[in-house]
Image: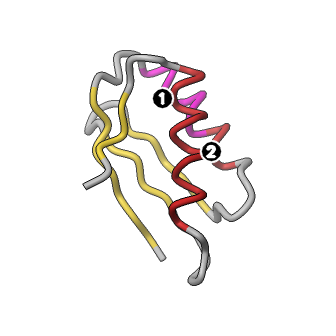
């Protein structure tokens, strides 16, 4: 499954790259991209993945890299 989320207050392209590398290391993530230009996070994970638990980990990783950045979880 593929999901895309809006990022709010992503201020640094280098931080986006750090987030992308860290998210790609998380178990259950097949592929992740963080775009500084579009302020978007795209993740791919196998069907049946506990998306709520995975998003909690992703939010934690993002906050560690850039504390002011927020994932808009519709």
Which residues, given as a range, are shown in magenta? 13-20
The one of 74 and 14 positioned closer to us in this rendering: 74
* Camera-side mark, 2 or 1: 2
Q: Along the polypeptide, which appears first: circle 2 or circle 1?
A: 1
Residue 6 sits in quarter: top left
Q: Residue at x 49, y 19 (%)?
A: 66
Q: Label 2 belongs to which residue? A: 23
Give neighbour class at mark 2: few <14, some 14-19, many 20+ (Cα, 10 Å).
many
Q: Residue at x 52, y 26 (%)?
A: 63
**Element assignment for label 2:** helix
**Element assignment for label 1:** helix
Q: Label 1 belongs to which residue? A: 16
The residue sitting at the bottom extreme is 47
| 11, above or below 72, in the image | above
Percent across and percent down for residue 14 are 51, 19
**Most frequent secondary structure within the magenta stretch:** helix
| 35, above or below 47, in the image | above
Q: Residue at x 57, y 39 (%)?
A: 20
Q: Residue at x 51, y 39 (%)?
A: 59
* Marks 2,1: beta carbons within 8 A: no
| 21, above or below 51, in the image | above
């Amino acid at each position: 499954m593929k999901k895309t989320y809006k990022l709010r207050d992503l201020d640094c392209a280098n931080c986006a790259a750090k987030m992308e590398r860290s998210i790609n290391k998380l178990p259950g993530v097949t592929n992740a991209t963080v775009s500084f230009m579009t302020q978007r996070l795209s993740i791919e994970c196998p069907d049946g993945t506990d998306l709520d638990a995975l998003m909690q980990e992703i939010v934690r990783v993002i906050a560690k890299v850039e504390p002011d950045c927020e994932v808009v979880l519709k």
